[in-house]
Amino acid sequence: MNFKPGKKVVLEKLADYPLMPASLADMTHNFTGSWRNMRPVIDYDKCINCGTCWKFCPEPAIYIEDNKVNVNYYFCKGCGICVSECPKKCITFEEEGK
Amino acid sequence: MTEKKPIKTTIPEHEVMKPGHLACQGCGASLAMRYATKAIEGEAMFTLPACCWSVIDGPFPYSSLGLPLLHMAFEAAGATASGIRAALNMLGQKKVKVIAWGGDGGTFDIGFQAISGAAERDEDILYICYDNEAYMNTGIQRSSATPYGAWTTTTPVKHFEKRPKKDMVEIMAAHKIPYVANVSVAYPEDFVKKVQKALSMEGFKFIHAFAPCPSGWKIKPEDTIKIAKLAVQSKIFPLYEVEYGVKYNLTVKVPNPVPVLDYLKLQGRFRHLTEEEINIIQKGTDENWDLLMKKLENK
């Protein structure tokens, strides 16, 4: 996975602040995966590469790499849209910490 | 294991919006933004009135949108977008698209005068309203986009919403602007195509996006897409476009419509409704659909 978490911006003194209210980084330092109770797990034997889960992921925490769909568990909030929308029902919900 | 066919994506594959944003689980608004940003080719700039997306984007100095963005006061999205357009034109940056992105509160109620003014002046901007049918960011208060029968914190079960939803698309079409369309997060191909079409046109464009809100509608997060699909299939939210206020076109046809009850029963905000009230909703939906069909015939 070619994912790198974003940098955290530390603004200690006034001189660190930008002159205008501009954004200095994206939110990829914020691992929203900790919100998750249920973890989606893809069964690659049944997967038909339709890309439906990728299409409907609101994060987007599902990415396409090596001709398959992968879940980025750093960011998956566990909403379950991929589980309910998968036409082959090959994504299962498993409880975290089991 | 046999070799699998390559994944063919039906919408552009690149991601503009970054993960790590602060939307709730299963948020329709973040999904809508993902599709809208995918449709943009070239440079674009956003302006946001106060809405859920002011929070989803992240606190200062972070932004998960991946595009230049100007936060603005609640009522000023249309005026701000007009101002940005004028400033960019002065700088010779005519190619940069200006997109205003507001919730239903900032579009239907509070920002209405600014949008109507910008539409009347026919400014070259695209206004996208993501509609979650109440003021979700501040705690589910009723807006004029709240449909008949819905529970909100300001229309509790005993005094539930008694007025139908404001028909924003028809109001905007009456301004005779180049392009007005309805889109839904359950139909991403249609969504991306309409945003691309709108961005290719000149003048004021308005897109009304249906974005279910799991926490405000009291639905399960995994049902977001299912409910958005049922809204289209039950004729409550028809997907059509209007060009120059006269040329109607239905983009997603509904060959096998389902009763509105299928759509209503999945949502906790409609749980208190009796059969009589559901019949009122069904009758209103059918009337709206017949009216739309008449407009489609006149094209």
Image (spheres, coloured by chain):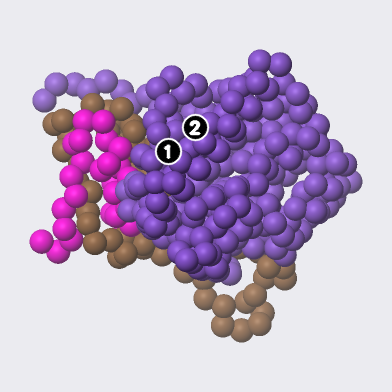
Q: Chain of mark 2?
A: B
- Residue B286 image offset from top left, x and y in percent: 53, 31
Residue shown at 50%/43% (left/top)? B280
Residue shown at 69%/27% (left/top)? B242
Q: Is residue B128 magenta?
A: no
SS class, disc 2: loop
- The tag on residue B235 is 2
Residue stretch in magenta: A70-98
Three-letter amino acid code of the residue under disc 1: Val
- Residue B141 image offset from top left, x and y in percent: 56, 65
- Residue B250 image offset from top left, x and y in percent: 58, 22
SS class, disc 1: helix
Q: Which residue is mark 1?
A: B260
Q: Which image quadrant for residue B2?
A: top left
Instruction: Looking at this view, name the residue that lies furthest to the front.
Output: B276
Q: Which image quadrant for residue B36?
A: top right
**Which colour is chain A painted?**
brown
Q: Is residue B127 left or right of residue A94?
A: right
